[in-house]
Amino acid sequence: MTAIEQTVSLGDKAVRRIGFGAMQLAGPGVFGPPKDPDAARAVLRRAVELGVDHIDTAQVYGPDVVNELIAEVLHPYPTGLLIATKVGGARDETGGWVRASRPEQLRATLEQDLRTLRRDRIDLVYLRLGVGGGGPAPVPLADQLGALTELRKEGKVGLIGLSTASVDDLRAALAITPIAAVQNPYGIGNREDEPVLELCREHGIAYVPYYPLGSAFTGGPQALASDPVIASVAAKHDASASQIALAWLLARYDRMLPIPGTSSLAHLEENVAAGRIALDEEDLAALENAGHLGAPAF
Ligand SMILES: NC(=O)c1ccc[n+]([C@@H]2O[C@H](COP(=O)([O-])OP(=O)(O)OC[C@H]3O[C@@H](n4cnc5c(N)ncnc54)[C@H](OP(=O)(O)O)[C@@H]3O)[C@@H](O)[C@H]2O)c1
């Protein structure tokens, strides 16, 4: 069975292995409306047509812009579509990323997600711990998770996840409440998060790698394509380097759920089709030391 036929259960939903990261649908710098709103709408529509049933978004994308686009195009949502959001950050008036992790801020962001996405409950909410650009001193983890467990009791949150979390964060969180998924930066070109991935494997926690293609911010896809080993495996499978990077991720863990981000229909089709590629032992051995591009900033 190739990955395209597999699902992973997350709460009351079973999602396909390749999801969609919606961050690329905002304007430049993930701020404001997209340059081409019709193209963004077409990508969302096509994602669902292709069977994508796991969409990753956040109030901070735009802010609100991406959530509103998702609701405009996809509401009423297909049964089985899992929408995940993140709380813990906010945007300032210039688009800067700031921390918003006090319990009342977490609640306000979640309420805004519910409004803009037109949902009564967000299936999966990540508490984002790291925030680019810093901000006020972090609130204790127990207080932040306390806010989310309250919201879960109220039925507004389905599952709780962690994002940009360390091994220590994950261990501390697990002592407080079940954690359904971790969303951290990871990919063939950035493997620094292996210890968190290993802890997820031990606990059967879904692992959602962000920047699975190495990120737009650092020219990830182009760097993947210029790696000779990735290029040769890609040629063998008549695939693109990005597809090999996704297939490599899928082979790392059976609860690995990449959310490649794109604003392009062609790239979307390519990314979903990566689930059909089965890398063999020889490919995986060759890729063992390929693609080390360095950790993307942020
Ligand atoms: N938790 C967090 O803090 C956090 C942080 C960052 C991102 N995320 C989430 O993770 C998702 C993925 O991250 P990302 O979008 O930043 O990075 P990514 O998926 O690694 O890469 C996106 C970049 O790759 C390009 N691309 C996509 N598919 C391609 C293909 N098949 N061939 C060539 N280029 C391709 C996109 O450009 P085109 O638009 O031209 O396709 C875009 O420039 C985001 O959308 C977001 O939902 C979460």
Image (spheres, helix red, strand yellow):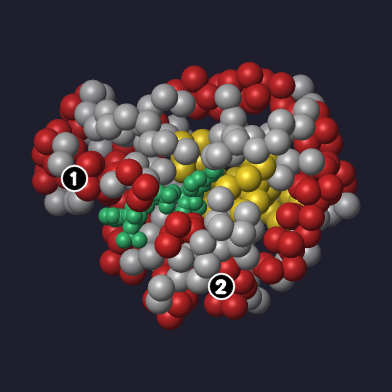
Residue drawn 41% across the image and 73% down it: 35
Compared with 138, 158 (above or below) is: below
Q: In this view, does 220 lie to the left or right of 139?
A: left
Residue drawn 55% across the image and 56% down it: 95
What x and y, as percent, mark residue 79? 63, 67
| Label 2: which secondary element | helix
Q: What type is the residue that disc 1 sits on?
A: Ala
Compared with 264, 86 (above or below) is: above
- Label count reads 2
Q: Mark 2 points at which residue?
A: 69
Q: Is residue 171 left or right of residue 139?
A: left
Estimate how packed mark 2 is, as few (under 14), some (14 to 19) or many (20 or more) residues with alpha carbons within 10 Å.
many
What x and y, as percent, mark residue 236? 12, 43
Residue drawn 40% across the image and 76% down it: 36
The one of 181 and 5 positioned closer to us in this rendering: 181
| Label 1: which secondary element | helix
Evaluate whether residue 181 shows in this view: no
Q: Indicate yes or no: mark 1 CB to ligand 1 under 8 Å.
A: yes
Q: What type is the residue that disc 2 sits on?
A: Leu
Residue drawn 56% across the image and 63% down it: 62
Q: Mark 1 points at which residue?
A: 225
Compared with 91, 249 (above or below) is: above
